[in-house]
């Protein structure tokens, strides 16, 4: 027996009723009553399943065996060859004592004893169908609906329909009824065809969805009895939905498969959208039919290298018209969406094929030509093009930016690199990203959190660095902060260097002043992720920069309001208390205990003070193991930063891998400030680059971090307007009408007042 006969793919049905590929391997009956699938890549065990005598196994499309091992755990084996499927099916039927000619071995439902007895009495008698005539449609409709509760009777009806060619006769009757205008007959045919779909039989679907039958099936489903007028599904499929071949498809079988998949997907999504949970189970074979069609389409297209090569050639040809290029891009969008049906190993091979054919240069050309109005040049890094497109999204709701943020998150996750990637390769990618791309991502954040003017006259009103009324800008900053928070979790070494050398956390925490509470919460979440790492280098940085001050000011400004901001800040300090982060506890109690002593509705701050006192007692008895000499810690920190510089030097050794573009980056570093995004009158950003991209962050990083005294901790001087509250409530208006009025009891004094 050849290996290909036993070669299978293992699928499981997830909670969204979608099939997930679990791997490819070879199936065998390791014991007389057990199925085992061994992975072909590494020999791992993909499946071990005992053939239970009471389990309902179903054979579909000649190469599929489907069954359920638990209430919500469905499995499927997709065989490469029909012979292998037949062989395993015979083994299953042998264990269960069934005839291999059946397509389902057991009744998966909970039938009553009367129904089981009826099935036993009828099992030896074939089911008789009424004549396919207009006067017998009501009888046929009743028959189809009556068999649905019983799998055995559904199986018998399916066999009777197939053996007599009844479906094609039924569709001929539909055409005659439509010509005669027999509305009652057409409504009965709708119920009959819908019932045939609910029989959940792959063999019936193959007939109903064949080229000569599928449009008549769609026609039958137009005449729903509850509607006064029939739908126009056939008109849409034949006139509105035009099939466009961006490149002529020479394989007629592939073209037919694409047409069939589109029409069956239309039946599932448009014609049959409102079905019950029970009907969902009956239509599982329909979902499987679409799924495996998509797998076959992707495989056939991937194997046709001449077709894909021609597609890429037109994508990258400067003479290609924009409308044609748009169609080519839409094709790739659908092509890549279909590729999600592939198993992980095959998906990696699929993307490698696209990469070898030049997908990335092609996408770069497409994106630059589409978004050239932002001043992007042809030698810009593709990932920077994506970042700038996100930043420059003109949609007030930032719909495109949200999608691109998800894409960037995937690109920035080193775990998404192909399986053979080594740790050094992942580190090299991250070093490259932080050197040449991170400054582009953080540009809007830095532009909106600028330093205060050191020459400002003391006592003058200090401007809020955040654009307080621009909701779109706040949304964009929130997206950027979400990505940076992701980096804190997954790029521990590189993001740590970036945050510390650019004093990024201080800049982020100025957003605690925002009138948009969601943005203030994003800034707080960023700090919470950093503290959650319990990294003493981060803790030292926070203490040295007095970075709890804006957080505590926000808590005091929030007053007695019980809202999400209040809860999030309390949770931050509670985490520090529970985890007993001593360096942070000492800093908080030493500097803020007086300001926080009035907060008594939670025990968090009293608990922090208690921890602090306990540690002081330990130190007085000489038992503290946590106090470190300041000079020693500073030396460690300097050593760590030096190691970071050495690591960046390693990246420079691989410049040749990135071509002459990398060489030009050194010359362009000094121009970074000119490359900051300019905010337009509408509040969106626009890039106007004097060069393709700035690599370094020296412009931002050369300035030493501001001292703790430069943070906005003090209250506004007497006689000046108080700063805008983080969360707006109607009752706040009276509090802010006059700065000369007495301070509201709902507001606690800010630090420094």
Image (tube, helix red, strand yellow):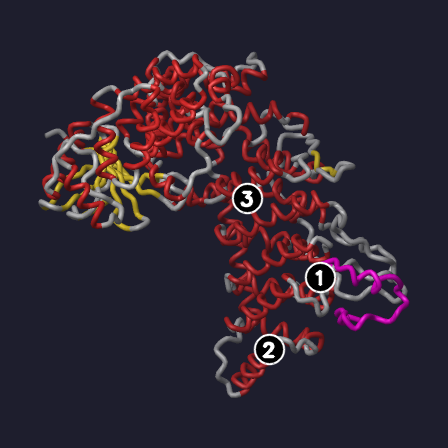
Image quadrant in which you'd find residue 300: top left
Is 172 magenta? The answer is no
Query: In this rendering, does residue 4 appear at all?
Result: yes
Residue with the mark numbered 3: 434
Residue with the mark numbered 1: 707
Image coordinates of residue 726 in percent, x first then y, are: 72, 58
Main SS, magenta region, reads: loop
Q: Residue at x 86, y 65 (%)?
A: 717
Q: Give the mark, 1 or 3, whose residue is nearer the N terminus.
A: 3
Give yes or no for contact between labels 2 and 3 (Cβ–Cβ under 8 Å).
no
Q: Which mark is residue 615?
A: none
Label 2 to label 1: alpha-carbon separation: 32 Å
Q: Is residue 500 left or right of residue 352?
A: right
The C terminus sits in image quarter:
bottom right
Image coordinates of residue 397 in percent, x first then y, are: 65, 40
Q: Residue at x 70, y 31 (%)?
A: 688
* Element type at mark 3: helix
* Element type at mark 1: loop
* Element type at mark 2: loop
Q: Which mark is residue 603?
A: 2
Which range is magenta? 726-753
Q: Give the mark, 2 or 3, whose residue is nearer the N terminus.
A: 3
Q: Is residue 3 left or right of residue 707?
A: left
């Amino acid at each position: 027996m050849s290996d290909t006969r036993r070669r299978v793919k293992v699928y499981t049905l997830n909670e969204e009723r979608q099939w997930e590929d679990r791997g490819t391997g070879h199936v065998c009956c390791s014991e007389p009553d057990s199925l085992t699938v061994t992975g072909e890549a590494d020999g791992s065990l993909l499946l071990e399943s005992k053939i239970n005598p009471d389990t309902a196994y179903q054979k579909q499309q000649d190469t599929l065996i489907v069954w359920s091992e638990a209430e919500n755990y469905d499995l499927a084996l997709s065989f490469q060859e029909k012979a292998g499927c037949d062989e395993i099916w015979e083994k299953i039927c042998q264990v269960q004592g069934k005839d291999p000619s059946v397509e389902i071995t057991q009744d998966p439902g909970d039938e009553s004893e009367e129904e089981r007895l009826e099935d036993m009495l009828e099992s030896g008698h074939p089911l008789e169908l009424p004549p396919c005539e207009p006067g017998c449609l009501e009888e046929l409709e009743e028959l189809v609906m009556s068999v649905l509760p019983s799998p055995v009777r559904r199986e018998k009806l399916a066999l009777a329909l197939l053996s007599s060619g009844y479906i094609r006769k039924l569709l001929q009757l539909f055409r005659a009824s439509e010509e005669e205008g027999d509305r009652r007959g057409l409504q009965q045919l709708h119920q009959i065809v819908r019932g045939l779909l609910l029989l959940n039989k792959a063999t019936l679907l193959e007939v109903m969805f064949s080229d000569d039958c599928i449009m008549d099936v769609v026609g039958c489903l137009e005449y729903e009895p509850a509607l006064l007028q029939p739908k126009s599904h056939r008109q849409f499929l034949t006139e509105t939905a035009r099939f466009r071949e961006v490149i002529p498809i020479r394989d007629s079988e592939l073209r037919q498969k694409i047409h069939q998949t589109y029409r069956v997907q239309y039946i599932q999504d448009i014609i049959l959208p409102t079905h019950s949970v029970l009907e969902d189970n009956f239509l599982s074979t329909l979902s499987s039919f679409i799924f495996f069609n998509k797998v076959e389409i992707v495989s056939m297209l991937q194997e046709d290298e001449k077709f894909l090569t021609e597609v890429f050639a037109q994508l990258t040809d400067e003479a290609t018209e924009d409308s044609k290029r748009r169609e080519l891009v839409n094709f790739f969008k659908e092509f890549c969406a279909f590729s999600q049906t592939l198993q992980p190993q095959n998906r990696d091979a699929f993307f490698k094929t696209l990469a070898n054919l030049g997908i990335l240069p092609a996408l770069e050309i497409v994106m630059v030509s589409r978004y050239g109005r932002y001043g992007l040049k042809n030698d810009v890094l593709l990932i920077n093009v994506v970042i700038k497109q996100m930043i420059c999204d003109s949609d007030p709701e930032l719909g495109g930016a949200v999608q691109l943020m998800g894409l960037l998150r995937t690109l920035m996750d080193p775990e998404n690199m192909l399986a053979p990637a080594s740790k050094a390769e992942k580190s090299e990618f991250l070093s490259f990203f932080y050197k040449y791309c991170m400054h582009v991502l953080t540009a809007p954040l830095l532009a909106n959190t600028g330093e205060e003017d050191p020459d400002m006259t003391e006592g003058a009103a200090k401007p809020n660095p955040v654009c307080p009324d621009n909701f779109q800008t706040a949304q964009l900053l929130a997206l950027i902060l979400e990505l940076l928070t992701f980096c804190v979790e997954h790029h521990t070494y590189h993001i740590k260097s970036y945050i510390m050398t650019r004093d990024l956390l201080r800049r982020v925490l100025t957003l605690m002043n925002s009138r948009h509470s969601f943005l203030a919460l994003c800034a707080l979440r960023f700090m919470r992720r950093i503290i959650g790492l319990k990294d003493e280098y981060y803790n030292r940085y926070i203490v040295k920069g007095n970075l709890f001050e804006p957080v505590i000011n926000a808590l005091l400004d929030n007053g007695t309001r019980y809202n999400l901001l209040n809860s999030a800040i309390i949770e931050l300090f509670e985490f520090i208390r529970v985890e007993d982060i001593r360096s942070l506890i000492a800093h908080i109690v030493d500097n803020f205990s007086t300001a926080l002593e009035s907060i008594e509705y939670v025990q968090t701050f009293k608990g922090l003070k208690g921890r602090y006192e306990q540690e002081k007692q330990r130190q007085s008895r000489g038992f503290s193991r946590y106090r470190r000499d300041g000079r020693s810690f500073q030396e460690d920190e300097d050593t760590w930063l030096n190691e970071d510089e050495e690591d960046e030097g390693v990246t420079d050794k691989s410049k040749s891998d990135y071509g002459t573009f990398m060489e030009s980056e050194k010359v362009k570093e000094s121009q970074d400030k000119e490359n900051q995004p300019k905010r337009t009158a509408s509040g969106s950003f626009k890039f106007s680059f004097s060069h393709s991209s700035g690599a370094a962050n020296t412009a931002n990083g050369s300035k030493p971090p501001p001292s703790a005294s430069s943070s906005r901790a003090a209250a506004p001087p007497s006689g000046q307007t108080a700063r805008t509250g983080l969360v707006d409530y109607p009752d706040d208006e009276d509090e802010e009408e006059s700065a000369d009025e007495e301070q509201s009891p709902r507001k606690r004094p800010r630090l420094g007042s």
